[in-house]
Structure formats: structure tokens, C-alpha cells
Image (cartoon, helix red, strand yellow):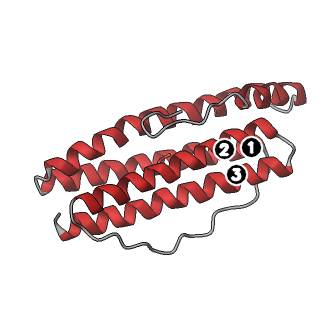
Amino acid sequence: MKRNIEDAFNLHLNAEFYSFYLYLSMANYFEAQNLGGMAHWMRVQSEEERSHAMKFVDFINDRSGRVMLQQIDQPRTDWNSALEVFEDAYSHEQLISGKIDELVELANQHHDHAAHQFLQWFVSEQVEEEATSLGIVEQLRRVGDNPVGLLMIDQQLVGRAPSGDSTSA
Ligand code: FEO
């Protein structure tokens, strides 16, 4: 694989590992708030992010590139409300979608069809991830300060099943 695509993929897998860290941090915040359903949802999400990073690791290796792991930034650890956490999650997914789009542009510029095809899974995944986090943001906005509403959403999120590599939530 071309060097600049390899470098960009290495940079991106770091962003996916950061996503793993960020969602794990959000899970721990919810544990501390005794919102077990939201903690569970974030824990599952963090595992998905780790699997996204590993897809990049495997792709680089399969193309005889060199995986270069870099330092992972410290994520935020505190928020003021469940709504603020999910708003952050939604913003983060928008940021990641932008990065995926840039990778697709780069693959196209270099006529790297294998990289282009690999990235298509992530293009679809990002549509779903943005929609899911925004959906929860909207529910949380609707319940506002109502503690019963908050607990109902928490109960609903406890049902998120761990997902396999090819599925998402
Ligand atoms: Fe792997 Fe949520 O982006």
C-alpha cells in the first residue's frame, strides 16, 4: 500500500482506539451515576470501537503495510448530565464520519480500490452510529429533567446486545 495511505490508516486506527477509550470513559461515568443501562450501552459501544480499530490493523497487515501504534489521548472523564454525554457521543461520531470521508477521498486520489472498498463498510457504519446516538439525544431532550423518564431510557438501553464484527448499533 502507498505510504501516505498507510500513514493515514495508522492515524485513523488511533482515532478508533481513542473512540474505544472515550466510550469506556462514558461507561464508567454512568457506572458512577448508577445508570446501569447507559453504562452497559457505552461498554458495548466501546467494544465495537475496538473492533473497528482492529479492522484497520488487519487491513494494513493484509496489504503488507506496517502498523504503527501511537499514544492514545486521555478522554474526558466527567459530564454534567446523561444528555451531555450522548451529545458528546453524537459529535464524536460526526467527527469520525468526517475522517472516514477524508480517507475515502485519499483512496480515490491514489486509485486504491482495495482501500476504497474496505472503507465502504465504515461509511455505512457511520450513518448508523450517528443515527443511533442522535436518537438517544432526542429521547433525552424530550424527558428533560424528569427522573422517571431518565430511568425509563436507562432501562431501555440495558437491552443492547453485544454485537459481532459485522453488525453495529
Ligand atoms: Fe468507529 Fe463510532 O466510529
Q: Residues within 10 Å of mark 2 (few under 14, many from 20)?
A: many
Circle 3 is placed at which residue position?
Answer: 26
Which comes sooner in the sequence, label 1 or label 3?
Answer: 3
Q: Say which amino acid is labelled 2.
A: Met
Report the side of 114 relative to 24 (left or right).
left
48 vs 169: above or below: below
Q: CA distance from mark 2 to mark 1?
A: 5 Å
In percent of width and height, residue 122 lies at: 36, 42
Give yes or no for contact between labels 2 and 1 (Cβ–Cβ under 8 Å): yes
Give yes or no for contact between labels 2 and 3 (Cβ–Cβ under 8 Å): yes
Q: CA distance from mark 1 to mark 3?
A: 7 Å
Circle 2 is placed at which residue position?
Answer: 42
Q: Say which amino acid is labelled 3.
A: Met
Q: CA distance from mark 2 to mark 3?
A: 6 Å
Quadrant hosting residue 5: bottom left
Circle 1 is placed at which residue position?
Answer: 39
In percent of width and height, residue 118 lies at: 27, 45
